[in-house]
Image (cartoon, rainbow, N blue to C red):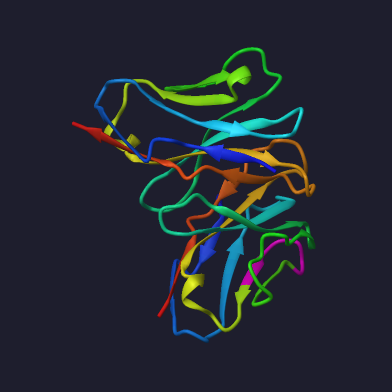
Amino acid sequence: GAGVSQSPRYKVAKRGQDVALRCDPISGHVSLFWYQQALGQGPEFLTYFQNEAQLDKSGLPSDRFFAERPEGSVSTLKIQRTQQEDSAVYLCASSLITGGYTEAFFGQGTRLTVV
Amino acid sequence: AQKITQTQPGMFVQEKEAVTLDCTYDTSDQSYGLFWYKQPSSGEMIFLIYQGSYDEQNATEGRYSLNFQKARKSANLVISASQLGDSAMYFCAVPYSGAGSYQLTFGKGTKLSVIP
């Protein structure tokens, strides 16, 4: 596709359930980012991939959060044993090159609600 | 680390009028850039405009322009001739290079409402 695609768009999970969120970046984009956006806030950085390598995971809030990008394209963000505080929109972004100040293209996000 | 401040939680503007959205930033980087993104109710973050700290002239993209004042660490977005479709959240963001990932640090955003 032409843009960054995320699925599902909406996810309702019972507390304690595991969830997996998918991101399809723009083809050929080297860099991939995950952000978490709480209601009424700006997005906050979670983790960064350069191709298949996860170079920065400093923003992951706990060890219940795990991300992978095994073949350097599609990425999955997994949250284990979801808690109510995990309710947020999860945004994925990709950019063509590493470093510098290149434009990041965002997907529409996955809205996760934990009940 | 970076800190981005957007002091206007909400703004109203009459259709066809110009509006200025404020952003101040605090960064320890010598060379940096600043992005503005628009987020409509659909949720997607849409890139609007970018300026690097060493760019001589203020950036302009169609109806969007940046009023970049480095000494004041201010980078306000000016939208001219507002349209109903401009109603959205607007976020200012600065890349953080400390961890080598050029992740974006965002402000809390300003909700712009365009009145017909």
* Segment colored magenta: A70-77
Q: Is residue B107 left or right of residue B55?
A: left
Image height check: is A107 above or below B10? Answer: below
Magenta-span inclusion, residue A71: yes
**Residue B4 is drawn in which quadrant?**
top right
Q: Is residue A85 left or right of residue B11?
A: right
**Residue A54 is drawn in which quadrant?**
bottom right
* Point 67% across, 40% down: residue: B95
Residue A15 position within the rendered picture, expressed as x and y whole percent measured from the top left? 47, 84
Image height check: is B16 above or below A6? Answer: above
Residue A65 position within the rendered picture, expressed as x and y whole percent measured from the top left? 64, 73
Quadrant containing the C terminus of chain A is: bottom left
Q: Is residue B115 left or right of residue B6?
A: left
Q: Residue lying farthest left? A: B116
Q: Residue lying farthest top? A: B56
Residue nearer the viewer, B13 or A27: B13
Q: Is residue B101 left or right of residue A18?
A: right
* Point 65% across, 51% down: residue: A94
Magenta-span inclusion, residue A34: no
- The number of numbered discs placed on residues in the rendered structure image is 0
Image height check: is A33 above or below B109? Answer: below
Q: Main secondary structure of the magenta part?
A: loop
Residue B3 position within the rendered picture, expressed as x and y whole percent measured from the top left? 60, 40
Residue B41 position within the rendered picture, expressed as x and y whole percent measured from the top left? 36, 51
* Point 46% across, 76% down: residue: A84
Quadrant containing the N terminus of chain A is: bottom right
